[in-house]
Image (cartoon, rainbow, N blue to C red):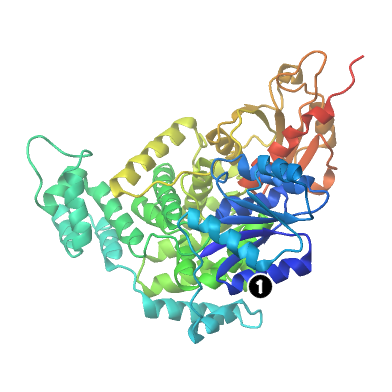
Amino acid sequence: MVCIVLICGNNKEKQILKLALEQRGIKVLLAEPVYKNYLTIIQYLPDLVLLELPRQAHEQLHFCGLIKGHKKTKSIPIIGYGIRLSEIEKRSLSQLGICTYLQRPLKFSALVNVIDQFLKASNKKIEKDPKPNSKQNDLNKLLCSDIPGTQKIEIMSDHVSSLMAFPFTVARVLHLTQDDRTGAAHLAKAITADPVIATHILKLSNSVFFASSSRRITSIKDSIVRIGFNETKKIVMSMTVINLLDKNRKSFGFSRIAFWNHSLSVAVISEALARQISNINTEEAFLAGLLHDFGIIIYDEFFPDIFDTVLQKTVNEGSSFIQCEKTEMGITHNDLIAALFPKWKLPQPVTDVIVMQDKIQDIKPESLSKNDSKFAFCVGLSNLLAKSLITGKECDEYIYAVSKEHFLKAGIRAGITNQFIEHVTNQIVSFKRMLKLDEEEQTKLHASGHQIGIVNFKRDMFIAPSIYLSKHGWGVEIVSPTQNTAELDNKFDCLILWGGDTVSVQDIDTYSKIIGHGSEDTRYYFSPLLVVTSNTNDFTESEQLAVMNENFDLRIFILTLEKLISKKDDRKPDVK
């Protein structure tokens, strides 16, 4: 299906255009020309952007600049329309990234012809969606607030169970893990039952990863010995789960390949963290990481209309996917997994931790003495780290702060070190290659080489934005709140006060006089401040100061930084 982002200030015209385009079989996403809605372009990568240009079009043209300034979106055609313009004005729009300009009165037939021309150039065409069947219409009622959550879960789980079964191979391999008497022969028997997996294991054992010049492997048992018992188990579980559903994209704005890259990354990180935390089964940690958001791909496969509604709300609001689920449906994809996994005979500890892992904020540090809480913390933290490392992508990049007390109580006394990040990154890359999981180029927002200082008032052992910014090519330095502020002059384009509930107005006064990076004696400016806090109402925003809650989407975070830094010329004080 063709996808168009429509940006129009006239509500009546917007709805008429949306209805007319949808009747032609085009998916239409509504947006506004603001930073926040730039996420819609990034998430959905539409075929076209249809943009109304009013008489005062500064915001619209700036939005065009954002689209054309990003390597991932710069090739998206932008069709503008509005008042009658001179040829000189049209040429100016063309230089700013507007491919075609249509004058009012806007003729729909002319618009469709222009759209067709751009689609033909990219070998696409408009195809109408098949009409939804009665069963799909029934499922769409799940968005109705009058239906109790328990009933919705029952309807959804029955629907999924009637159409698919979870592969027995995963449960069997995991069962072998928990029996000390099992060896390569038992695992080989389980693998042989699945010809596709067996063929891949044989090929892998003779690949450049494990090949030996001495002899070629021809049996599954010998393949297991060469690859390694534990590595083979992880490969089998990963392949079985990933191959369960088609890897091609089904819903706009959601890539299954990117999703599996993210899920596999969480699996690898979960296993690595489980080795540092006592009393967690590493194989179960790997599987729980792999399946931590399996309910999302179930949505995509069986409930696409519901999935599309929640995903659009997530992108438009910059909220977490799971919070938007609760708002729209009163339930989450993890509630669905809680009903499905027992039917599929998956281990109860894995099911329990998947339901808990998105709630690690609610886990009190003292409760981490319990194994189930530690297990949930392990997987939830792995999810946050995978998002920070930009290894794959799910439905949001929403993160939240994790306190130092949580790390200490869980037994991760060194925190997330650079050595640990390097280790899991290498493991993720190696594992993806072994699975032949296609890589997708990750979207990087405005990698510009800016220098950022993060004043760690909370003394946290893990600051997700620090890793995320570094991966985007920004320079990042963690600053102690006890450091002499005079030493910070001329070092940073922006300072982030990472404070939770510890940052005060006095701290704002202290850090607001830090001289910005690269400034000259006669044209100096003060570095802007971004306060990340749990008490957002305590501070008033200004040209120099932006405030964010400590729970946020990383994409909104980086865009907020860009916006702050872009205004630095307005903050240059007079020098006498």
Q: Which residue appears farthest toward the bottom when viewing the image?
A: 134
From the top left corner, tell me how far across and down residue 36 is, in percent: 69, 50
Give the residue at x 59% y 31%.
474
Give amino acid for label 1.
Answer: Leu
**Residue 417 seen in the figure:** yes
Give the residue at x 57% y 72%.
24
From the top left corner, tell me how far across and down residue 343 is, in percent: 38, 75
Q: Is residue 62 found left or right of 523 in the rendered image?
A: left
Q: Is residue 350 found left or right of 458 in the rendered image?
A: left
In the rendered view, tell whether residue 302 sits above or below residue 484. below
In the rendered view, tell whether residue 362 sits above or below residue 341. above
Q: Is residue 573 found left or right of 129 in the rendered image?
A: right
In the rendered view, tell whether residue 147 sits above or below residue 178. below
Res 105 → quadrant: bottom right
Taking depth in this image into account, of 398 and 87 the one nearest to the observer is 87
From the top left corner, tell me how far across and down residue 122 is, in percent: 48, 54
Q: Which residue appears farthest toward the left when viewing the image?
A: 215
Q: Secondary structure at mark 1?
A: helix
Q: Residues within 10 Å of mark 1 (few under 14, many from 20)?
A: some
Q: Is residue 408 found left or right of 196 in the rendered image?
A: right
Res 276 → quadrant: top left
Give the residue at x 60% y 59%.
114
Taking depth in this image into account, of 382 and 51 the one nearest to the observer is 51
From the top left corner, tell me how far across and down residue 212 is, in percent: 13, 36
Give the residue at x 54% y 61%.
116
Res 461 → quadrant: top right
Taking depth in this image into account, of 418 and 440 the one nearest to the observer is 440
Q: What residue is disc 1 on?
A: 19
Q: How many marks?
A: 1
